[in-house]
Amino acid sequence: MQKEVETIPEMTSSQPLTLEVLQNQDVLNSASGVWKDLTSPNHPADDLRWLRVLAKGFDHRPILLRAKRGESVIGQLPLAKVQGPIFGKFLVGLPYLNSGGVKTDDESAAAMLIEKAIHLTDEHNCRYLELRHEEPRVNPGFNAELTTKIHMRLPLQENQEAQRAALKASVRNQVKKGEKQGFTIHWGGPELLNDFYKVFSRRMRDLGTPVYGRKFFAAILDEFQDSAEICSVRDGKKPVAVALLIHGSNVTEVPSASSLPEYNRTNANMLMYWNLLARSVERGQTIFDFGRSTMDGPTFKFKKQWGCQQEPATWQYYLREGSVEDMRPDSGKKKMLIELWKRLPVWLANIIGPWIVKGIP
């Protein structure tokens, strides 16, 4: 497919503002070619390689909108067309990631990118457009938003000793208790995917949530070979707490992590998170991103104890059909399905789950 180019002349600039629309293979080539010569983004969520991950892991259709002045890219909006057998079609920027949407400081470019995304939502007959912004963008096309989630981020210290000293006494004591249990810490890539998926998929079943496919996490490790790694805490040979860690140039994020609830009293999870922080400090990172949480929910309280700062999350929508809340896992309509899912054998949930979750924005 040839890339599409639109030109919007402006009286305020000597160079016209142009828009490129890249789809399918053009996008994948951009993610591996055009952007490879640029410095690694501060936050891993801003890395265009996610378009390749989503295409390989979920079979999502990737779309990249780029605003340019002359030959200079001044803004971008990566999108994925999410389509499954149950829920319909959605245009999302981007699925799985905690933040995304429009990336530009130019208001004219932002307006053009959003307007094109709205047009594509209509063109592809999607139920809605979802842009996972942190700060809201003003655009008359938006007709709904969600602000129930917040980002939890921790400024990191210069070395591990200072990082440990910065912890609350209660958190340090829990980490020390975990260190006395005889657990071993393992770092790696694809060779630890079995450890990761065994714990993660069981925990997702326990929570009543369809699990991402193993293929998706394999795609992450393949595309982010230089910056993604798995941490596994083992009791002997048994993995009991696992995490996927992805490093940007300044920010490290943990997009997925789980631990076995029967090991809660051993503080294996606290030990793992301490090692995630220590690993990030060792790499010279300045921020550790714990991900998003619902205010005052269980994961919010867990993350808050580490000293996280709260930052806004504003997911903005162009809604064409249905309700935004219909697709959220905490919707009241989902409660009975969640309870039923908790009763499935893990092996069955692991077969059905990826088929369902690939169609959820």
Image (cartoon, rainbow, N blue to C red):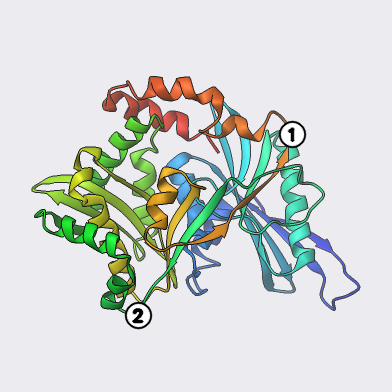
Residue at (35, 25) in percent of width and height: 342
> Would you call the spot at circle 2 few (<14 residues within 10 Å), some (14-19), or many (20 or more)?
few
Residue labelled with disc 1: 320
- Amino acid at dot 2: Glu
Image quarter of residue 57: top left
Q: Secondary structure at mark 2?
A: loop
In this image, 148 relative to 65: left or right? left
Q: Is residue 333 visible?
A: yes
Question: Is the residue 202 above or below the residue 52 in the image?
Answer: above
The mark found on residue 69 in the picture is none
Residue 135 spot, x, y in % from top left: 65, 59
Q: Is residue 254 visible?
A: no
Image quarter of residue 82: top right
- Amino acid at dot 1: Arg
In this image, 218 relative to 108: left or right? left
Q: CA distance from mark 1 to mark 2?
A: 48 Å
Residue labelled with disc 2: 158
Residue 181 spot, x, y in % from top left: 11, 53
Q: Secondary structure at mark 1?
A: loop
Do the residues bearing badges 1 and 2 touch, measured as CB atoms within 8 Å?
no
Residue 359 spot, x, y in % from top left: 52, 33
Between 87 and 288, the one nearer to me in the picture: 288
Residue at (60, 45) in percent of width and height: 92
Q: How many marks?
A: 2
> Would you call the spot at circle 1 few (<14 residues within 10 Å), some (14-19), or many (20 or more)?
some
Residue at (79, 46) in percent of width and height: 141
